[in-house]
Amino acid sequence: KNEVEQSPQNLTAQEGEFITINCSYSVGISALHWLQQHPGGGIVSLFMLSSGKKKHGRLIATINIQEKHSSLHITASHPRDSAVYICAVGELIFGTGTRLQVFP
Amino acid sequence: GAVVSQHPSRVICKSGTSVKIECRSLDFQATTMFWYRQFPKQSLMLMATSNEGSKATYEQGVEKDKFLINHASLTLSTLTVTSAHPEDSSFYICSARNPLPGQGGNTIYFGEGSWLTVV
């Protein structure tokens, strides 16, 4: 069993839809990161969470430390949101990613 | 703009040669940087932790003599792939942690990555 698991692995959506990506982990953590990787490979750090909820624009990230679960939400999705979203525990353990495609 | 810069973004080298990839923190001093590799459609895998002024810590299965890491200053870490082979072709990416408190503090920033192709 992977220490960090994401679901779904692949996700397609129509523009404007609300999107949720989930991440469950089995190790103790000090922080969890949500990353975005575009087809060219570059990675952008979206959020770093240790508790509660953070919001940046159309993106919302939540974490429940007791349940060892985090979610990334995208409101009013747009084709430019198409990317791979990766959950990472600290700097060491990465989920396999969720490939999101948003169609116009 | 990017706060961690990686160079080169793409490199092609001949088998048997060595290639150096640089990772620079632009707006902060990073005592610790991390190097990862990523194969197509797979997740990132940590290769090593680069510590300024001391030897890097390598993950199990990563050959330290093949992947030389130097962290000579607080803003620069380098990864040298020595005697490169085609199976070393991969996407290499670095990250750096801003250790300072406050806005942006204790946040990890990733470089843009480097595509290495060994022919």
Image: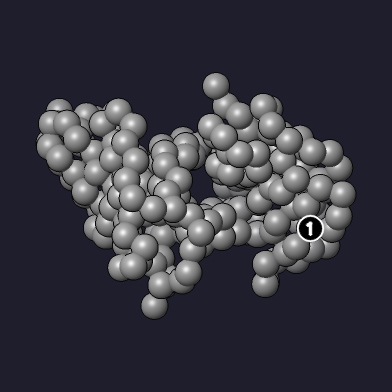
Q: Is residue B117 visible?
A: no
Helix, strand or loop at mark 1: loop
Q: Nearer the viewer, residue A46 or A80?
A: A46
Left or right: residue A29 compared with residue B18: left
Q: Position of residue B10 (x, y in %)?
A: 62, 35
Residue B41: x percent and y percent?
A: 42, 54
- Asked if one can make out residue B61 in the rendered structure from this viewpoint, the answer is yes
Q: Residue at x 69, y 47 (%)?
A: B33
User: Quarter holding the C terminus of chain A?
Assistant: top left
| Relative to A5, residue A90 above or below | above
Q: Which residue is pictured at 31% across the width and 36% down the height?
A: A55
Q: Outermost residue, bottom direction?
A: A1
In the image shown, does A16 or A65 lie closer to the viewer?
Answer: A65
Q: Is residue B10 above or below residue A28?
A: above
Name the residue at 12% across, 37% down. Answer: A17
| Residue B118 percent location from the top left of the image | 67, 48
Location of residue A82 with respect to A23 vertically, above or below: above
Give the image's coloring scheme. Answer: one colour
Residue B9: image location, x then y, percent:
62, 33
Residue B106, quarter of the rendered image: top right
- Disc 1 is attached to a residue of which chain? B
Relative depth, front residue between B112 and B12? B112
User: With A102 as the anchor, is A61 left or right in this view?
Assistant: right
| Quadrant where the N terminus of chain A is found in the figure | bottom left
Is residue B2 or residue B91 the one in the foreground? B2
Q: Identify the residue under disc 1.
A: B56
| Number of marks in the rendered image | 1
Q: Amino acid at mark 1?
A: Ala
Residue at 70 percent across and 56 percent down: it is B49
